[in-house]
Amino acid sequence: MSTQTPSAATPSESPVEPRWLTSDELEHWERFVAVLELLPAAIDAQLKRDAGLTHFEYYVLHMLAESPDGAMQLKRLAARTNSSLARLSRVVSGLEVRQAVTRRRHDCDARASDALITDAGRQLLVSTAPQHVAYVRSTIVDALTPEQFATLGAISEQLLEQLDPKRERFYRGKGDDRTPLPELSAPARRALEAAGITSLDELAGTARSRIEALHGVGPAALERIDRALKATGLVPLA
């Protein structure tokens, strides 16, 4: 989609004039688009050259290694890696071939599976990390001043709030390692918050009778909670 004013209008176009980018805005936007296009390919190329991994494969191994027992339910891992479950499953299958990851039945849900990083997977991650971190540092971190890099982080967070306002897709790190509540009515959300429940993780395995007793949490809210717990692979209401 062009960001510049078109040379001629067509009868089907809206009569409301779009807010076309100024020359300065267009220049900034085009540079940002160039980074979006070039950076992922450059990171993939470095990891492929040094370890035969894509960045996504490396990220999956990293997330598993960071989990307490080296394992994570696949649906949850998909959310943590900003991926669809289908894409993640294909990548995990490839890592299984390399004996870097195995699958096992989820402890609390026999219908679900966990991905588990193996000793070989940990060794692959350990041997790959120094070159990868060096590349990220030389290409991005050290190319900016500390102030510029901090500003980049703040800008990225602001853009993520626009792209993922409910914090359902992007994993923001250990300080935000909770699954958000599904979209609920204001009374239902207030009732849960009054009970000290601010994330889906805190609902997992909770007695259904306790939640039903909360004033403001009706059948529609319970249905949404049930669906969200199932979709994320968390333990259902008891």
Image: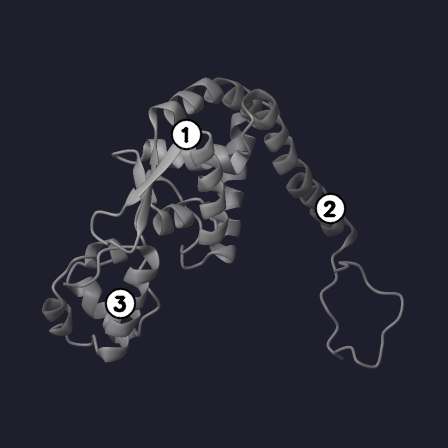
Residue 65 is labelled as: none
Q: Quadrant of the C terminus?
A: bottom left
Which residue is labeled 1 in the image? 100
- The reply to whether the C-beta atoms of the residues labelled 2 and 3 are less than 8 Å apart is no
The amino acid type found where label 2 is placed reads Glu
Residue 30 is labelled as: 2
Q: Secondary structure at mark 1?
A: loop
Q: Secondary structure at mark 3?
A: helix
* Residue at the (41%, 30%) spot, across then down: 100
Viewer-closest of 206 and 12: 206
Q: Mark 1 or mark 2, which is nearer to you?
A: 1
Viewer-closest of 12 and 41: 41
Q: Give the percent coordinates (x, y) of residue 69.
A: 25, 34
Which residue is labeled 3 in the image? 226
The amino acid type found where label 1 is placed reads Ala
Marks 1 and 3, the one that precedes in the sequence: 1
Label 2 crowd (10 A; few <14 / some 14-19 / many >=20): few
Marks 2 and 3, the one that precedes in the sequence: 2
* Residue at the (83%, 81%) spot, across then down: 11
Quadrant assignment, res 45: top right
- Report whether residue 63 is seen: yes
Up/down of 112 relative to 148, above or below: below
- Report whether residue 151 is seen: no
Q: Give the percent coordinates (x, y) of residue 28.
A: 71, 45
Label 3 crowd (10 A; few <14 / some 14-19 / many >=20): some
